[in-house]
Amino acid sequence: MLTKKLIFMNALKCKMIFNKFHTNQCCMEIQKLTRLRVVDNSEIGKQAMAEGKPPKCIHVYNKTGVGRIGDKVLVAIKGEKKKGILVGLKQNQKPMVPKFDSNNIVLIDDNGTPLGTRIHVPIPTILRTILKEKTHTKGADYTKILGIASRFV
């Protein structure tokens, strides 16, 4: 009887110790099924955000599968598949890169041309160097996104 009681008490202590540690990873990253916020004035983006059905990430176009600033993603928006560029993230960033309150995206065509004509939120200045590098390596012209941005942080 005494040994059963001791085993039960040890199990409770172990459970209390393990409850203090987090075993899952941080959820502030762009991965599949992450909700995003469209920040340009494209027609499909405005309609989706007005209806309260924000786009969800289907695929991240990089080796890790975790989205960073400047990465291209595939999103499901209003029953369609569109591509977009991440321009602001909630997750912890490198030094001198601002952290945003929401995960922001700008919708683009297949050749890198933005669907909207204006970006409503400030975008980070580090995006200039990131998009210029990707423009030279990938062939698509992502620098047009910098042209329609009104403010930089």
Image: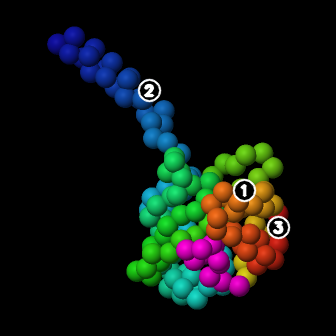
Label 2, residues with CA under 10 Å away: few <14, some 14-19, many ≥20: few
Residue with the mark numbered 3: 152
Q: CA distance from mark 1 to mark 2?
A: 48 Å
Place of residue 126 in the rendered image (x, y in percent of width and height, measured from the top left): 78, 56
Residue with the mark numbered 1: 133
Q: Is residue 112 visible?
A: yes
Q: Nearer the viewer, mark 2 or mark 3?
A: 3
Place of residue 9 in the rendered image (x, y in percent of width and height, measured from the top left): 31, 20
Residue depicted at x 55% and y 74%: 110
Left or right of 62, for residue 96: right
Label 1, residues with CA under 10 Å away: few <14, some 14-19, many ≥20: few
Q: Amino acid at mark 3?
A: Phe
Q: Amino acid at mark 2?
A: Ile
Q: How would you classify the magenta stretch by its main secondary structure? A: loop
Q: Is residue 27 visible?
A: no
Residue 17 numbered mark, or none = 2
Span colored in magenta? 103-117
Disc nearer the start of the sequence (3/1)? 1
Q: Under tag 2, what secondary structure? A: helix
Q: Nearer the viewer, mark 1 or mark 2?
A: 1
Residue depicted at x 76% and y 53%: 97
Q: Under tag 1, what secondary structure? A: helix
Q: CA distance from mark 2 to mark 3?
A: 46 Å
Between 73 and 54, the one lying in front of the other is 73
Place of residue 44 in the rendered image (x, y in percent of width and height, measured from the top left): 54, 85
